[in-house]
Amino acid sequence: MSDLRELYQETILDHGKRPRHFEPMREAHHSADGHNPLCGDRITIYVRVEGDRIERVTFQGNGCAISMASASLMAEALTGRSLAEAERLFAAFHELVAGSGAPDEPVQLGKLHALAGVREFPVRVKCATLAWHTLHAALERAGQGGPVATTE
């Protein structure tokens, strides 16, 4: 078990120090700004959707290793998924880091499991979920006729 925990820590540190998809996206269809006032994390999520598929997710911002790693892993995990799949993944991830049990339906989380240890530190849950809530706000706002939203 300690080898697995070590691997997860390495994944978080790697994505935290060298986040993937860390860039603005000029051709984004939707974007949102998120802020975690408890620790100062700030993030902007950019999303390009074609039909019902997430074609691309990028982000910019600054924050702790958990926040940056979560955004990086989220962008990797959601690229190419349908909006419905993204919602299921969001629910499963939220259950993983903040919930009290297994998600209602099994969802393959892949590298996102690296953040499972956040559950042991409730104050860090907002760090891990900031990018996800910000993405959700961008997509939800888009359905209301506007491309930009802010989540606090």
Image (cartoon, grey):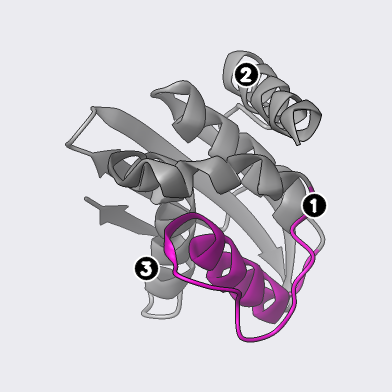
Q: CA distance from mark 3 to mark 1?
A: 32 Å
Q: Magenta stretch? A: 81-110
Q: Secondary structure at mark 1?
A: helix
Query: Circle 2 sits on which residue?
Result: 13
**What residue did someone put label 1 on?**
110
**Quick one: SS at disc 2?**
helix
Residue pictured at 38% horizontal, 39% vertical? 127
Q: Quadrant of the N terminus?
A: top right
- On the rendered structure, is 10 left or right of 127? right
Report the residue marked by disc 3: 146
- Mark with earlier residue (1, 2): 2
Q: Quadrant of residue 141?
A: bottom left
Q: CA distance from mark 1 to mark 2?
A: 17 Å
Q: For the point 71% across and 20% down, which residue is it? A: 10
Residue 25 visible to an observer of this rendering: no
Q: Amino acid at mark 2?
A: Leu
| Identity of the residue furthest to the top in this view | 17
